Image (cartoon, coloured by chain):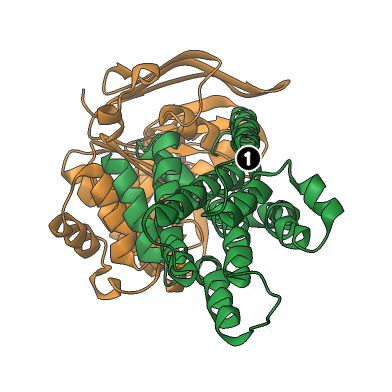
Chain colours: A orange, B green
């Protein structure tokens, strides 16, 4: 309950443009939830509403069972947020950047050093934030979000623009938080990131959730072809329909040592999104 | 109080690294010390440079520092993070304002020493300077709140500084300008400083300062209502 996020028919408009149109969410404590959608789909607006930065026009949002409109300062401490546009004090070093928030939260130097260690920034403790690489700056933002050991982490595209090694180190941090029972709400463009990290995802398009569920389950739902693709050692590819005859054929190919790889033809999330909306998710 | 202290100490640790702001605190006192000790003329009024640069300091340093610091935090989205961390807008503004005030105390001390004020005269000088600094801070906060980024803040700050900082200086040499400048708090600060030890406090000066304060406060409320701190 303490890390749960629920949204009930959330609507938000800017002028005549409806940015979010009846959003429902039910995220349980300890889950990694991914919100996917192309640019302009309403992801950042939704994360702002969930974190109380923006007020919805209609609908209810509850974090840990508390209506966000009733949030107190103590409630806000229960979640950490990183957004791409959240700034760092560029002239201050990593330690002093966190020291400000430690003072606000009533924490000591021990906690600052612990989060710097956790995010792999111990060696950069005296480095001004303005001199950090993009990946290290991202980790400093994460360190700031980790400071209060929050129940829920809201991460807005945490690995956007990062190299695969840095992205992987951030993935490990996110998974470590899940292992500690924390809820993680992340937005991403990356299908592989969503498939790797998320228990459940929502596909957002033009302010509406068009699909919701576990990534593999969604992909299976759109596996209209239901075929097996077999790559043979002689270089040929075969497609076999699901069925008893195909099972026998496949068993023979394997027994004869002809089959090199066997895959199902279920689509990836990118393809599913394309099928639903006619749009490229990474656009 | 905890949040005000956090913002104040953050700003303090940034002092030596933020050269454009740092220079505002030391520029006018340094020039005043230099000129008071190098230029002497028989017909020059007593402590002429000290008084002139004290008023310029009051009209420039607190105003430009407040607008610069607030607009920088808005532009770089650090203010948004602070507000998300449960720092209230008033706490942030008081924290930044306290920092600018404390830093201006250093310059004020230099001017007081340069003027050789003691006892009651020193107290009068400090009170007048503090009044001016607070009013300038409020004016700078109006610009900072109104501006989306540092570029906008700078383009608004320069003409305002020309009015509040340079007008009293020019008024020393031109009677018409002096008459026109009387509606500004900085000209009244200038007249109060020039009047220390010679005449009683002018009620007109206090009324003009109070009116300037009311106007600045109203502008601040309007800017805050329209733009907030985001």
How many numbered discs? 1
Name the residue located 42 percent from the left edge and 45 percent from the top edge.
Answer: B81
Q: How crowded is mark 1: few (under 14 residues within 10 Å), some or many (20 or more)?
A: many
| Residue B164 screen position, x and y as percent | 69, 52
Which image quarter is the N terminus of chain B in?
top left
Q: Residue furthest right?
A: B176
Please, which chain is the residue tagged with disc 1 on? B
> With respect to residue A105, does A97 lie above or below?
below
Quick one: B190 or A172, which is closer to the camera? B190
Residue under the point 58% across and 21% down: A12
Q: Position of residue B16 (x, y in %)?
A: 42, 72
- Quadrant showing the C terminus of chain B: top right
Q: Badge 1 is on which residue?
A: B205
Say which of A207 and B95 sits in front. B95
Work out whether residue A283 or residue B77 is closer to the camera in this orientation and state it: B77
**Residue at 47% from the left image edge and 49% from the top image edge:** B130
B40 lies left or right of B73: right
Q: Would residue A265 be seen by someone viewing this image from the given angle?
A: no
Quadrant for residue B204, please give it: top right
Q: Position of residue A109 (x, y in %)?
A: 17, 59
Outermost residue toward the bottom in this view: B38
**Is the residue A235 above or below the residue B123 in the image?**
below
Q: Residue at x 22, y 34 (%)?
A: A30
B171 to the left or right of A77: right
What SS does tag 1 mark?
helix
Q: Is A220 situated left or right of A105 in this image?
A: right
Instruction: Give the camera-side residue of B217 and B110.
Output: B110
Whether residue A162 is visible to the viewer of this picture, yes or no, is: yes
In percent of width and height, residue A97 lies at: 34, 59
Choose top left, top right, bottom left or bottom right for residue B184. top right
């Amino acid at each position: 309950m303490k890390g749960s996020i629920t949204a009930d028919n959330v609507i938000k408009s800017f002028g005549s443009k409806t940015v979010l149109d009846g959003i429902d969410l039910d995220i349980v404590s300890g889950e990694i939830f991914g919100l996917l959608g192309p640019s302009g789909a309403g992801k950042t607006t939704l994360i702002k509403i969930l974190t109380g930065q923006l007020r919805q026009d209609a609908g209810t949002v509850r974090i840990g069972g508390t209506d966000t409109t009733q949030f107190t300062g103590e409630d806000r401490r229960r979640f950490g947020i990183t957004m791409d546009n959240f700034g760092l004090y560029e002239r201050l070093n990593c330690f002093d950047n966190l020291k400000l928030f430690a003072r606000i939260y009533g924490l000591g130097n021990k906690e600052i050093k612990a989060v710097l260690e956790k995010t792999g920034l111990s060696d950069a403790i005296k480095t001004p934030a303005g001199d950090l690489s993009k990946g290290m700056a991202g980790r400093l933002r994460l360190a700031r979000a980790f400071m209060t050991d929050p129940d829920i982490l809201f991460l807005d595209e945490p690995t956007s623009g990062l190299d695969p090694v840095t992205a992987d180190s951030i993935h490990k941090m996110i998974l470590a938080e899940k292992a500690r029972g924390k809820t993680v709400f992340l937005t991403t463009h990356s299908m592989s990131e969503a498939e790797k990290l998320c228990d459940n995802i929502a596909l957002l398009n033009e302010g509406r959730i068009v699909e919701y569920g576990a990534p593999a389950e969604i992909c299976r739902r759109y596996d209209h072809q239901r075929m097996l693709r077999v790559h043979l050692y002689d270089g040929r590819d075969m497609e076999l329909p699901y069925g008893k005859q195909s099972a026998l054929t496949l068993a023979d190919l394997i027994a004869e040592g002809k089959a090199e790889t066997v895959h199902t033809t279920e689509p990836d999330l990118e393809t599913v999104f394309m099928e639903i909306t006619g749009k490229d998710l990474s656009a | 109080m905890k949040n005000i202290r956090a913002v104040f100490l953050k700003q303090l640790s940034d002092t030596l690294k933020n050269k454009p702001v740092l220079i505002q605190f030391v520029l006018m006192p340094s020039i005043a010390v230099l000129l008071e000790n190098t230029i002497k003329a028989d017909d020059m009024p007593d402590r002429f440079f000290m008084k002139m640069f004290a008023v310029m300091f009051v009209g420039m340093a607190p105003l430009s520092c407040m607008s610069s610091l607030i607009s920088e935090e808005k532009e770089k989205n650090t203010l948004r993070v602070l507000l998300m961390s449960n720092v209230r807008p008033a706490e942030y503004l008081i924290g930044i304002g306290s920092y600018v005030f404390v830093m201006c105390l250093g310059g004020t001390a230099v001017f007081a020493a340069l003027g050789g004020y003691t006892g009651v005269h020193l107290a009068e000088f400090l009170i007048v300077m503090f009044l001016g600094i607070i009013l300038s801070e409020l004016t700078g906060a109006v610009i900072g709140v109104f501006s989306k980024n540092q570029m906008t803040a700078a383009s608004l700050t320069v003409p305002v500084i020309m009015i509040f900082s340079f007008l009293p200086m020019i008024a020393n040499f031109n009677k018409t300008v002096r008459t026109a400048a009387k509606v500004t708090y900085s000209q009244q600060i200038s007249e109060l400083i020039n009047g220390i030890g010679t005449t009683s406090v002018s009620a007109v000066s206090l009324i003009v300062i109070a009116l300037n304060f009311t106007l600045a406060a109203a502008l601040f409320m309007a800017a805050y209502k329209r733009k907030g701190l985001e």
